Amino acid sequence: MERDKEGITDLVLTRFLRYVRYWTTSNHHVEETPSTQGQWELAKVLVQELRDLGLTDVVLTDHCYVIARLSPTPGKETCKTIAFMAHLDTADDVSGKDVQPCLVEAYEGTTIRLAGGLVLDPAEDPDLANQRGKAIIHTNGTTLLGADDKAGIAEIMAAVEYLHRHPELEHGPLELIFTPDEETGKGLPEFPLSRISSCACYTLDGGALGEVETECFNAYRAKMHFTGQPMHLGYARGLLVNAGLMAASFAVMLPRTESPEATDAYYGYYSAMEIQGNPEQASLEVYIRDFDRAGAQRRVAALDHFARAVEAQFPGGKVSVHAKAQYYNMKEKIDAQPEVLEILKQAVSNLGLTYRLKPIRGGTDGSRLTELGIPSPNIFTGGRNWHSPREWVSVPEMVAACKVVLELIRLWAAA
């Protein structure tokens, strides 16, 4: 495996392989923050590692937010403060317990066979094919990998360690933020904003090399509750109202042409996430996503129409709809402070990388932080196939992301 002359490969790789072994799966059914106890373990590890790197201002809040400050080098005290952020949790779509990362030091460009008959096939994945001769890390097929977002954590922490090893490098005041429950879409519900003094924050929670994201979905989470009228099946004619069937009928009303699997680019969607129940009571959870806020609100309003249609199909049954905003598109507020993005563009360009601006078909904690007043563009981490047992990450791209962090630090100190 090729090592960079600065030694960043070893810094990033060692941390990433360690962090992914922590079981930090979040639970979107739990309202408390953090939603799972496993996130505390990694948070406490990061706190100790930061202190070992000489940071004295490190806080772990009552809700599992890690916030640390790195003091500026002499002469840089008046520089603007910037922050870097990544999240602790992994998605609950696939198990994140007992992750066994598989390091391939020089990928040969062939099909990789995983457990359960799964494969990573370069013929179907151009990004994977482009990694030939390079180092990648993939799952064994029984769990996700957790590059979303432990790659981001590793890249930030490696940058801090690099600064620690090179005290001659000038930098302004820096803030580091590691958050719980990003995958639940809560949007920093217990975040102590008063502790942050940064004028800008960069999240490391993106994908392929060079990709930068400054706009995201407007996101809503809707919960429908269905109340039926149970009856002995032998005497059900004209009397039974099956709540479970009501929920299923509602789900099939969601337009298939406006689903995640039928849309890309700037097209929004409805996504039925979970359905459960019985003839008496049932529930359905739906995610709504759209880059245009009016489009998202149109979909929210449509849910009420679907509810009335289901009630008409099942006389005597009742449907309630409860929709809640999770986060909003961050583009407008980032555009209002162009310096934040211009410096990021310069950092990427200075490293000889191709800068690619693309929308996030999702969101980050940076979406919410931007809404709170701190513009937070999203930077690539090198991960692919997130939330999947076929997840993998490019080691050179993780190194490149870490170098972008270091270059951002240098440019803001020179601004």
Image: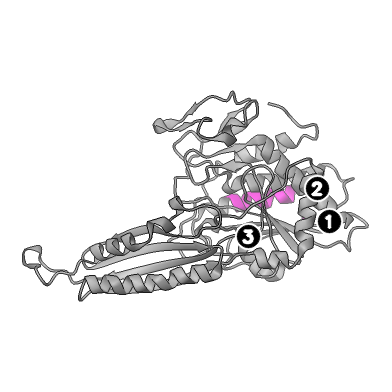
What is the crowding at mark 1: few (fewer than 14 residues within 10 Å), some, or many (at least 20)? some
Q: Is mark 1 on a helix, strand or loop?
A: helix
Residue, disc 2: 407
| Residue 59: % across, % down | 68, 60
The quarter of the picture where the C terminus appears is bottom right
Q: How far apart are the two marked residues, 3 and 1, measured between alpha carbons?
A: 22 Å
Residue 131 drawn above or below residue 58: above
Residue, disc 3: 215
What is the crowding at mark 2: few (fewer than 14 residues within 10 Å), some, or many (at least 20)? many
The quarter of the picture where the N terminus appears is top right
Residue 166 visible here: yes
Name, please, the residue furthest toward the right. 75
Give the foreground label among 2 and 3: 3
Residue, disc 1: 412
Q: Does the magenta-highlighted stretch encompass residue 13? A: no
Q: What element carries label 3?
A: loop
Residue 126 drawn above or below residue 85: above
Q: Earlier in the sequence, mark 3 or mark 1?
A: 3
Residue 160 visible here: no
Residue nearer the viewer, 305 or 128:
305
Q: What element carries label 2?
A: helix
| Residue 238: % across, % down | 11, 71
Residue interval drawn in magenta? 42-56
| Residue 109: % across, % down | 57, 25
Q: Does the magenta-highlighted stretch encompass residue 45? A: yes
Q: In which quarter of the image is residue 142?
A: top left
Give the residue type that dot 3 points to: Glu
| Residue 93: % across, % down | 44, 49
Q: In which quarter of the image is residue 151?
A: top right
Residue 89 as seen in the image, left or right of residue 48: left
Q: So how many labels did they put on this image?
A: 3
